[in-house]
Amino acid sequence: MSVGADGFRLHNVNENKAENKLEWVTGPSQDDHNRTFVINDEDHTLGNALKHIIMQNPAVEFCGYTVPHPMERKIHVRVQTRDTPALQVLHQALKDFKKLNEEVREKIQVEIQRYKEAHPDPDPETT
Amino acid sequence: MEVKRLKVEEFQLVDELDAKDSEDTETSPPSRIEIISMDPLEMEMDFIGYDISLINAYRRIILAEVATMALEKVYMYNNTSIVQDEVLAHRIGLVPLKVDPRFFEFRNEDETEWGAQDSLKYELKVRCTRNKEAAANETNPDVLFVNRKVVSSSLKWIPLGNQPDIFQEANMLPLHPDILLAKMNSGHEINLEAYAVKGIGSDHAKFQPGLCWYRMLPEVELTREVEGKQAELLQTCFSPGVIDIVTSANGKQIAKVNDARNDSCSRNVFQHDNIKDSVKLTRKMDHVIFYIESHSALKSYEILEEAVKILSTKCDTLLGEIEKHLETAMDT
C-alpha cells in the first residue's frame, strides 16, 4: 500500500499506474511460441480463470500460472503453443473470457428480472 | 528414480475416458444460471455448467474488490471515555454505511482536501451526564446516566460541498442505528470528526460488501436396496429431507434418495459397517450453489452484478494492453 500526502492509505484498485499492466519475461526458453507473461496487479482471481480459458484452446500445448511471491501483486502466465504465437493465444483467451463473462452478466440480469416478477416484493421500499 | 509404466490396458482405459469426455462436451446442455431465493440481504443461486475457476473469480472479487464506503479517518478532539482513541476509531471504522458507493470516486493519491465527490463527513459529539430523574434507589446504569451508551446513530452526517443537493440524510446514515461504539460514565465526553471514503476489501475487511461462498451440489446414490431398520438408520445419517423411506412394490419399507441438495456432506454413514457399502457420496462438479449475504449498502444481487462488471473491466484493461503491443509490433 502506498501512502498519500496526509499519511492516508490509498484505496485505488490500480495502484501502480506507472507500471505496465502486461510484460513478459526475457531470457532462455522464451520465444514467440513459448512465453511467460507477467500480469501486474493481478492474483489468483484472474490467473486461475485465465489459465482455464487458455487451456480450452486446442493450439495450446501447455499453460500454467504462478504467483512468484505472495507479497508482490503480480502473476506469471506461461503459455506454450505449437503454431500460433503465444501472444495471439492470450489475446484470443481474453476475448473469450470477456465474452463468457458478458454472457453470464446477461443471464444474471434476465434471471434477476424473472425472479423479481415471479416474487413481487410486498414492500417496494426495500427493493 | 523408479518410473511407473502404464500397462497397455490402462492406456486403453485412458483413451476411453477421453472419448467419453469429448462426447460429454458435445452433447452437454448449455450452461445456465438459476436463482433459488433472493432478497436484498441474501441470495442463493445455481451456476450450472460453468467451471469452478470462473465462480471462484466471482467469489474472490466480491470479497476483495467490490467497493463500498466506510469510515476511514477519525479526528479525535476529545475522548475522556475509557475506550482508548485507537480502539474507538477502529470500532467507528467498522460501522457499515447506507451510502451507495456507486455515486462516489476513489480518493486520489495526493489529495489533501475532503472532496464532495470522494468523501463523507460525520460528527460524533456526546456527553454523558447523571440522570436527575432517576429514582434514588435506581441501580441500572442505563437509567442512571444520560448517554450511557454511544451507538452508531449518534454519528451525524455533515454534508460537504454540493452533497445536500444530491443526497438525502436518511440515505447517508449508518445501516444499523444500534451498533454499540462505547459506554460512558457521568462526565465522560466524546467529540470527534470522521471521514468516510470508498475502498475495497483487499485493503481492509470493513470495505467488504458482504459474505460469499459456494459449494458443489452433493449427490447421494444408493448402490443396493436398504430396507427396514437399516433404512431408518440410513435416514439418520443424513441431513433431514435427504433420505425418504417409501413402501416398495412388494410391501417392504425401503430407503430412497429424496433430495441430496440439503445434505451437509457429513460422512456419518461410514461409521456403520452394515450400511456403509450401500451408498456412494459424490459431488456434481459442474453444478455450483453460490451464496451471497449483504451487510452493506449494496443489495445481494447488486454485489454480484458489480463483481461481474469488475471482471469484464479486468479483461478490457489487458486486451487494451495487448492491442497496444500488437500495434507497435506492426509499426516496426
Image: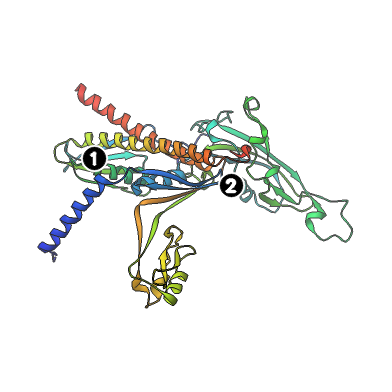
Judge if badges 1 and 2 mark residues of a common chain: no
Q: Give the secondary structure at mark 1.
A: loop
| Camera-nearest residue between B52 and B37 | B37
Q: Are marks 1 and 2 in contact (CB under 8 Å)?
A: no
Mark 1 — on which chain does it sit? A
Residue type of the residue flagged with mark 1 = Val
List x then y, in percent, for residue B211.
Answer: 50, 49
Looking at the rendered structure, the secondary structure element under dot 2 is loop
Q: Position of residue B275 (x, y in %)?
A: 37, 74
Alpha carbons under labels 1 and 2: distance apart:
42 Å
- Crowding near pointer 2: few (<14 within 10 Å), some, many (20+)? some
In this picture, residue B292 sits left or right of residue A84: right
Q: Identify the image's colour scheme: rainbow, by chain, secondary structure or one colour.
A: rainbow
Is residue B75 in sight in this rendering?
yes
Point out the residue furthest to the front here.
B250
Q: Quadrant of residue A74?
A: top left
The structure residue drawn at horizontal position 12% and vertical position 63%, both measured from the top left corner, is B9
- Residue B275, above or below B200: below
Query: In the rendered image, which residue does mark 1 sit on?
Result: A25
* Image quarter (top left, top right, bottom left or bottom right) of the C terminus of chain B: top left
**How would you rate the neighbour count of disc 1 (Cα within 10 Å): few for under 14, some for 14-19, many for 20 or more?**
some
Could you say which is closer to the camera, residue B38 or residue B136? B38
Residue A95 in the figure: left or right of residue B148: left
Tag in front: 1 or 2: 2
Q: Which mark is residue B131?
A: none
Pick whichever, B163 or B301, lies toward us.
B301
Residue B318 percent location from the top left of the image: 32, 33
Residue drawn at x 30%, y 42% is: A50
For the residue marked with disc 2, what is the amino acid?
Leu
Residue B94 disc label? 2
